[in-house]
Image: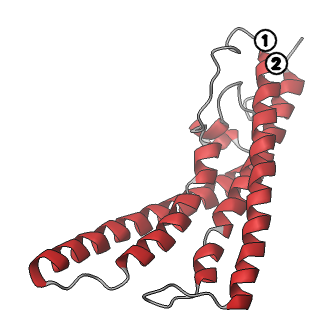
Amino acid sequence: MHNSLPTAGTAPSGSPAAFGSYGRALLRVSQIAAILGGLALVGLVIMSLISVVGRKLFSMPVPGDMEVLQMVAAAACASFFAYCHLSGGDVKVDFFTQRASLRTRLLLDATGSLLVGLFATLLTWRSAVGVLFMYEVQETSAILEWPMWLAQAAMLPGFLLLALSGFYLASAYLRARCEVKV
């Protein structure tokens, strides 16, 4: 099998050289998104700690801490999805397929990645529609009065990256399947 393509049941993330140039760029952007999401979660932990300590010791919590937590955590979690998929971190139940041929497993992996891409495309589209609606009605959070559309819009890049990752891996698995001798 060609070294630049994934094997069945794994993503080519073990070595970035296993990705083509588009895949390496996608992997790099996904890594940056995941790092930014991780930093956002660290910031939320620090904010929560300050709020709890402030509430207990000084009766002064961080105003709107739960609103900030909900908004930022959603976007942070969405930022991890693409890197997780590209690195093969998805949950797989391969008990029934472990004895299948390599070509069959590659086809199943391609199908799974295609479904991830399609589902993420649906998420991106419907979330974008939700952003536009929230923008039109100018919905705001209860305490801080932050525009709700901003929080939902912050999830869109993560969903879009996941869609691109799903389609990329689906094509990589299909290319690998074509190279397997029958």
Q: The residue tagged with tag 2: helix, strand or loop?
A: helix
Number of marks drawn = 2
Query: Which image quarter: residue 174?
Result: top right
Q: Circle 2 sits on which residue? A: 104
Question: Image point 65% across, 42% down: which residue?
Answer: 17
Gap in angstroms between the C-alphas marked 2 and 1: 5 Å
Q: Are marks 2 and 1 in contact (CB under 8 Å)?
A: yes
Q: The residue tagged with tag 1: helix, strand or loop?
A: loop
Front one among 65 and 1: 65
Q: From the viewer's perspective, is 47 left or right of 139?
A: left
**Disc sitting over residue 101 in the figure:** 1
Q: Is residue 62 above or below residue 41?
A: below
Question: Image point 77% across, 66% down: which residue?
Answer: 126
Q: How is the image coloured?
A: secondary structure
**What type is the residue that disc 1 sits on?**
Ser
Q: Position of residue 140 (x, y in %)?
A: 56, 88
Q: Position of residue 16 (x, y in %)?
A: 62, 44
Q: Position of residue 72 (x, y in %)?
A: 48, 71
Query: Which image quarter: residue 112?
Result: top right
Query: Which image quarter: residue 65?
Result: bottom left
Q: Say if residue 122 shows up in the picture.
A: yes
